[in-house]
Every structure is written in C-alpha cells, then in structure tokens.
Image (cartoon, rainbow, N blue to C red):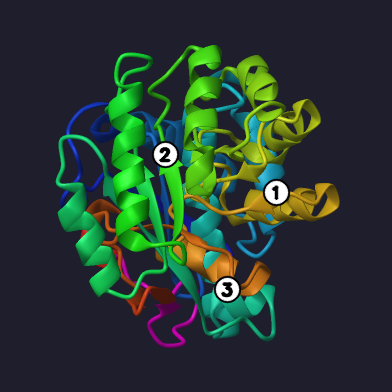
Amino acid sequence: MNITDIRVACPTPPGMPTGWRGTMGQIIVAIDTDSGLSGYGIGGGGAAARHVIEEALRPLLLGADADQIEELWERQYRATLAYGRKGLAIMALSGVDLALWDLRGKAADVSVARLLSPTPTADTPAYFTVGMAGDDPDAGIGVALDAGYETIKLGLGRFSLPADADVLVQGVRKVRQRVGPDIALMADAAMAWSDREAVLEISQALAEFDLGWLEEPLPADDLEGYAWLAGRSPVPIAGGEHEFTARGFSELLARGCHQVYQPDICWCGGLTQLRQIYALGRTHNVRVVPHRGSEVFGLHAILALEAGAPLAESGRPWMEWVGGRELSGGRARLQGEGAGFGVDLSACF
C-alpha cells in the first residue's frame, strides 16, 4: 500500500473562538494510496503547516509504504529540522501521522483503538469545561450537572493575579458549594499568569476545594517556573498540551514540571508520539490525560491505552465538529466500530 498523494485542507471549525486560539488553524491531511484507500488526520499550524507538508514532507513520502508509520515518522522528523523541533513542524507532522494510522486501521478493517488493544474499553469518563469570568458559570455548571458529568473543569484564564485573587477564590468556593463534595473539580488558567509566587499563593488558597489539578498557570515554556511551582503547590500542576514529541516530554519529566501531563495528539507528533508519552508516564508513574481527548483521534488512544482517564475536553463546539464519537451521561464513546478513526473527512477537500 504505497502513498500516491498527500493533500491538505485548512477548515474553519464552527464555534472557533476569536483571539489567539483562532490563529492556530487546524489542518486536515488526506493521504491517498494505490490500494484505493485514503486516510485522514488532523494537525495544527494552518496555512504555514500546509506549506511544510507540501514542500518538505510530501516529496519525502510519495511512493513510500504507508504501513511503515514509525520509520516514516523519523524520516519526517529529520527532514523538518529547519522548521524547528517544536510547534509548527510537529503540528504538521501530527496530521500526517494520524492519517497513516487511519490507513493502517482501514487496511486491516479494524478501528485504531483495536489496533492498539484487542480489548479497548467501551467508554470512559469525560469532563465539561465551564468559564468562570465573562461567561455565566452558574448556567454552565447547570448544563454539566444536567448532562450527568461528574467531573468539571473551571476556566480561570480571564482572572488577573494578584488583583483578582479574592474574586477568583470566592467564585470557586461558590461552585464547590453548589456541586457538593462528590463532583470532581479541576481548574485551567490557560497560561494567563507569569508570577510564580502569585500562582503559589492562589494554589494555596484553592487547596481547600479539593481540585484535581491546576492547569497551565504559567507560560508553557517557563520550565524553571513549573519545576519550582510543582514542588511547592498543594494542588497538582497539569500541563503539556503545548509540548511536542516524547523527547520534549522527557525533559518535562526530568525537571519535574508537572504531576499531570496533557499531550495533544493533533499537536504533539500524532499517535506515534502519544504512545511513547504514555510509556513515559507508566515508567515515571505520572498521570497522562490527553488534551482534547474527547475528539475522536484522542479517544481511540484513551480507550485502548488508559481506560478510565478523564478526558479533555467536552463543552467546546470547535473540538467536536469532526464527529466519530458521542457524549452522554458524562461519558465518551466511539460511534460504532468504523475502520481506522471511523470518520470520513473527504467533504473537506
């Protein structure tokens, strides 16, 4: 099964928020083969990533055996040195890698989840994200509870520190009082803060609310700050959605940056790298909870590799437009047993 063409589309997911997140630009990668099968994957980096694929990766991959996924990953990694070892190049490579895994599943007529495990679990808990400032948190909490979610993540990124610290703490207290002790809560600061001392103070103030983690409270590349904070915070520190490749995660682990690691399968290097990151997590006895895990690509991996891990992330329409999975009763499951990732993205081209 040899590769005959590689195509890239730059969709606009419905509901995509404005601001910096809207500039990231998902890409869809289609890989065609001489068998008549086509595989589809999603990456990041927008038009710039399309350029990387068309100019650097496509010539490298044409004519190659599509089933040599791991070897092709290393060839692409070596070929993209000029584009950097993090960010754009790896986001582009992620889409290609996922399309190759989709092809492997289609060729074997099984789901990617069954390629990874003969007995993937049927479903897994999901969590619902609710914004805490500028949105209506009461309404969002109500939606989550009515839908049966037992795990809720609170978005804290619109609060400033230390100016809004008291308001932030009171808001989280109000949520905990409403949901009671049996609903799991986490918090996500979306890299909004930079003062590690202020973050430590807010984590100490939030400790009484039994948060599962405090996600990305500092800029993603402040590894020194994260190592300092993770060793002192009473709330576990989560991060890694903006880290790339198993090599990058090895550095985070060596520095002790987080207690919870959150690779994004569409950014970190695809499924080939996510499998290695899971292996690192097992070796170092740390939690791996993929970012955007309720999207179909990450869900296949979670159901096969770590059943029962809470998923990132539901409640965000731009993360759900691809389809291929369903959410009900606070749990995520695949829609049927389609081969590969079980989604047809041909209409995007």
Res. 47 in view: no
Q: Quadrant of the C terminus?
A: bottom left
> Quick check: marks 1 and 2 in contact, CB under 8 Å?
no
Q: Which amino acid does the dot numbered 2 rest on?
A: Asp
Label 1, label 3: how far apart the Cα atoms are: 16 Å
- For badge 3, the amino acid type reads Leu
Which element is circle 3 on? helix
Q: Which numbered disc, 1 or 2, marks the residue that appears first in the sequence?
A: 2
**For marks 1 and 3 on the same chain, the one whose residue lies earlier in the sequence:** 1
Marks 1 and 2, Cα distance to the nearest angstrom?
22 Å
Of residues 257 and 322, the one drawn nearer to the viewer in this rendering:
257
- The x and y percentages for residue 186 are 46, 48
| Residue of label 3 | 303
Residue 337 covered by magenta stretch: yes
Which residue in the protein does label 1 denote? 277
Query: Are dots 1 and 3 in contact, CB under 8 Å?
Result: no
